[in-house]
Image (cartoon, helix red, strand yellow):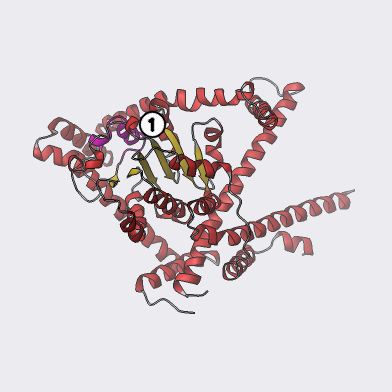
Amino acid sequence: MSTLEKVEKIDRRIVYLVLIIVVAAVLLRPIGLPIPISSSTKKYYDAINSLPPGSVVALGVDFDAGALPELGPMLEATLKQLFASDKKFVIFSLWGGGPAVSTIYLNKLKGLIESSGKKYGEDYVLLPYIAGGETAAAALAKDFKNTVKNDYYGTPVDQIPLLKNLNTAKDFALLITITAGTPGVEEYLRQWVSPFGIKFIVGALGVSAPNYMPYYTSGQIYGMIQGLRGAAEYELLVGSPSIAVSSMDALSAGHIVTIVFILLGNAVFLLRKYSRKEVKS
Amino acid sequence: MAISTDPSVWVAALLTIMAYTIIYKDNPLYKLAEHILVGLSAGYLFIQTWKMIYNSSLLPLFNGSGLLFGGITLVLGVLLFTKFSKKYFWLSNISIAVLVGTATGLTVRGYLFAQLIEQVKASIKVVTALQPLDIFNSVLSLIMVVCTLAYFLFTFEQKGALGWIAKFGRYTMMAAFGAAYGGTVMTRLTIFIQRMQYLLFTWLGLA
């Protein structure tokens, strides 16, 4: 087997090993690459800051544990910004794992919640999983209070002060979704944004963000955090650099390894193609 | 280096390593980790869904506040299980018809405005763009949309001018797929990096 053939047929476990070594090395010895802030992340941050005091925000935690590495930091930073602000918010979920993820971060931020002075039931509420996908999104938009009978902890909704005057999507100043897929952005666009004209910001996976760009460029999505890179930018804006910021160097190193192997593979492919042509001629 | 003494951290770390053994080759440790994940996810989702069904259908039925709503939804839900019967499977079609009809009606109503008309408006926003770069971006975007749509005109032979337009549309789509692939790489790497951070810092206590 020639050298080119050996490179072309390289065992993928060698690729994995190189990736593991590079990522581990950069995690243990960070480089400190700069993280410029993109306009879409800035608009996400500004959308929350620009709301009048006392505004109620609808926060859809629409992902489960599988998307925690990328969307968890976004949710944590969003909760930090909301708890530090003078806004109220309602957390709900169209995904089964959403409430569990929400409780993980609410427990993690217990100290911040206590120091913020925000009271459960008056300033923020956690609702349970609402099954039904798009029909659930539509039901919430049309009749928010009556779609859910209790909050996540079993308290009837008519005993929760914050939910008293929340009847339709119009009663919310902003809709946020941090979503791993469907149900998510398109369902909210069809059932909340288009009929009720509510301002809409999105936290999306890196794999999904390109699909939502048409909605961002058309203005239907006001601001968007795109993947872990967006989460790192958002953490810097919120003033609380955390896990996303610390992952940036390793992410860049991982991307460089991927690019090197893609270029190597294509170069070997082209060289073999031309050497076969020369042999034929 | 301060290795964690928390049993939950050890369980998570060992399950992570067991899952990653797949990159060497398929093995019983990987299968065990996979089955634990599937079982836990299914169990958790079952409980969450049951709680929702209980609160929205059963409770109103029992306390009389929603006899009609609770009764109808419960019956439709139970009818879905007739799918497993060779004799009565046709009853499940009633529930499926309600599900499909409701979802289609909601989607079509929203799709027209949210995803078609708004997107067409955004594609021709060149007339409202102000900055030179915005004008260039808008014009380029409009050309790419038209060329991409031309690629899918299969009722005409794609030669001559249409051939070139369709070819440019194909390159536009390739660029879009490249961007999507880049996003996919970032998502997969993120998951891997987060696991590495857990193993190196939370479990082994390095740095």
Q: Is residue A225 found left or right of A2 in the rendered image? A: left
Q: Dot 1 surroundings within 10 Å: few (below 14), some, or many (20 or more)?
A: many
Q: Is residue A133 magenta?
A: yes
Task: Please determine whether, in this image, residue A152 is positioned above or below residue B171.
Answer: below
Q: Is residue A74 visible?
A: yes
> Residue B133 placed where, x, y %?
69, 32
- Taking the spot 79% from the left edge, 51% from the top edge, the residue there is A270
Residue A97 placement (x, y as % from top left): 35, 51
User: Tag 1: residue type?
Assistant: Trp
Q: Secondary structure at mark 1?
A: helix
- Kindly identify which chain the residue marked by label 1 belongs to: A
At horizontal 56% and vertical 57% (from top left) the residue drawn is B189
Which segment did they paint magenta?
Answer: A131-147
Residue tagged 1: A192
Question: Percent position (x, y) of residue A135?
Answer: 33, 33
Quadrant in the rendering for residue A89: top left
Q: What's the magenta bit mostly, secondary-structure-wise?
A: helix
Magenta stretch containing residue A184, yes or no? no
Residue A279, percent across and down? 87, 53
Q: What residue occupies the far right of the structure in this picture? A: A281
Whether residue B86 can be seen here:
no
